[in-house]
Amino acid sequence: MYTAQAPPRPVHRQFPGGPPLAGLAITATVLFLTGLIASTAMAGKAFPSPFDSAAGILAYFHGHQDAVKVSGFFQFAAAVPLAIYAATVSSRLRTLGIRAPGATIALVGGALAAAFLAISGLVTWTLAQPTVLASPALVRGLHDLAFATGGPGSVVPFGLLIAGLAVPAAFGALLPRWLAGTGLIIALAAEFSTLSLRRRLPAARGQIRRARLADHRRGPAAQESPGARRTRPGMKGAIPVTPAWQVITGPRGTAGRTGTGHPMVPGEYGLACG
């Protein structure tokens, strides 16, 4: 009597869940720190902050172009393993049965952090190009953009990556509670880096106050409205021209009339609308 044997079941190969997370984290950290240390050693000073003086910022970029290029290169390179880390750790969480939004939050946060870090590196590299250095206003604008993307622009999403890992790890007992709690503290601190974008507001108000104080010290001539010092076409030198608001209201509340009581008409008596 023959017994039927069931056909052998296909063997499913167990593919690893991506590259090792520790190796990716170490690679991204080493590349980022290498850029900071190498650029500082080459320039003899730290990378300037956007809150430094404009003269100091321009002097740094004009005098240390190689250091700026090295900083931008390593910053861009560090974004690559960071993006791979975010994709890998999100896949690992789903493989472990985590269906909470934390896995998706970690993926989105890591992708945004890597993207903004890469943009900051490319903008930093652009700051070392001679055509950009020829325009001080362009240098200042790109420097602010590099700070915004490489600073809070990448740190805040990085906090989302850490929080997306720490919360599921804490509730799923994947990590010790003290380690998950440390991750939450780091994530919270990263979110507070947004406040660094407000630091320029008090400085701007201070510059306005100092400018007004300087005008007051120079006397009434420095406080004239911009329209009062415009020139008429075809004439040399600055000739006082009555602005349009004085045409309508008149000086000292004369309701737009001359000393003879006749209405003031734009185009007469050297008046100009503006």
Image (cartoon, rainbow, N blue to C red):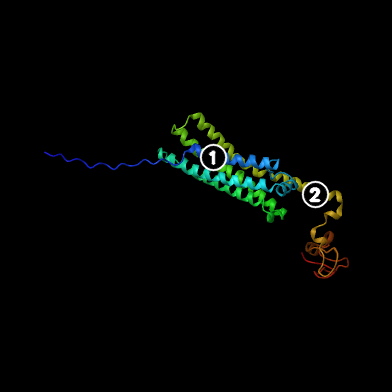
Q: Is residue 115 left or right of residue 259?
A: left
Return the residue at label 1: 27
Q: Residue at x 52, y 38 (%)?
A: 25
Point out the tag, 1 or 2, that comes first from the N-terminus: 1
What secondary structure is found at the residue carrying circle 2?
helix
Q: Residue 248: percent from the left, percent from the top? A: 78, 64
Q: Is residue 255 left or right of residue 101?
A: right
Q: Is 28 or 111 nearer to us in this picture? A: 28
Q: Residue 116: percent from the left, percent from the top? A: 57, 47
Q: Residue at x 52, y 43 (%)?
A: 81
The residues tagged by marks 1 and 2 sit, at their Cα atoms, a distance apart of 52 Å
Return the residue at label 2: 212
Q: Is residue 109 visible?
A: no
Q: Is residue 172 left or right of residue 111?
A: left
The amino acid type found where label 2 is placed reads Arg
Q: Is residue 167 visible?
A: yes
Q: Residue 230: percent from the left, percent from the top? A: 81, 63
The amino acid type found where label 1 is placed reads Thr
Q: Residue at x 63, y 50 (%)?
A: 125
- In the rendered image, which quarter contains the N terminus? top left
- Residue farthest to the right? 260
